[in-house]
Amino acid sequence: MKKTLREMPCEVVGNCDSTNLPSLDLCLLGSGADGHCASLYPDSTQVVCSPGCSSAYLPAEGKGGITASIDMINSARNVLISAAKASQADMCRKCLGWSNAATNCKLPAGMISTSEGAVVEWVLSEESAADLPAL
């Protein structure tokens, strides 16, 4: 699949200037209360080697198949992360409020950042946002 994405015309799938990885228009992710997203689980091999692995896809640990790397997700133009369950409130607080979230391998969802220029938005419910400071 990686080869196929790289062979597509740049009008279809462009490359991120800073990573040279394919840059999707939109990456829609779910997340779990443990901080996982995109089959990237806390402290897994995929999370520890990325960012900086310069690979678009990695083997999905324990599941078979593949998953997008953090570098690939961060290369997208727009990223939406969904977290709507009350059980995700603590994870949302840590991902959105900790200064080291972008490098914390225990919270892959928090590692999705705007470092590569993506617009990252979280879709939350009142329950999942309950631990966030009032704006």
Image (cartoon, rainbow, N blue to C red):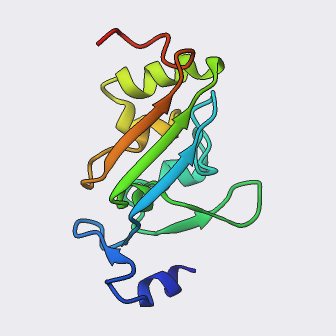
Image position of 88 with respect to 10: above or below: above
| Vertical relation: 18 (above or below) 63 | below
Quadrant holding the C terminus: top left
Res. 105 visible in picture: no
Position of residue 127 measured from the top left corner of the image (x, y, whole percent): 57, 15
- Of residues 38 and 8, the one nearer the viewer is 8
Q: How many marks?
A: 0
As drawn, the residue found furthest toward the front would be 126
Where is residue 80 drawn, in percent x and y? Answer: 45, 45
Q: Position of residue 58 (x, y in %)?
A: 58, 65
In which quadrant of the rendered view does residue 95 lie? top left
Residue furthest to the right in view is: 63
Question: Above or below — where is 69 with respect to 99?
Answer: below
- Residue 25 image position (x, y, % from top left): 38, 64
Quadrant position of the N terminus in the picture = bottom right
Seen at 41% across and 67% down, the residue is 24
Residue 49 is left or right of residue 17, and the answer is: right
Q: Residue at x 37, y 58 (%)?
A: 52
Whether residue 101 is visible here, answered yes or no, is yes
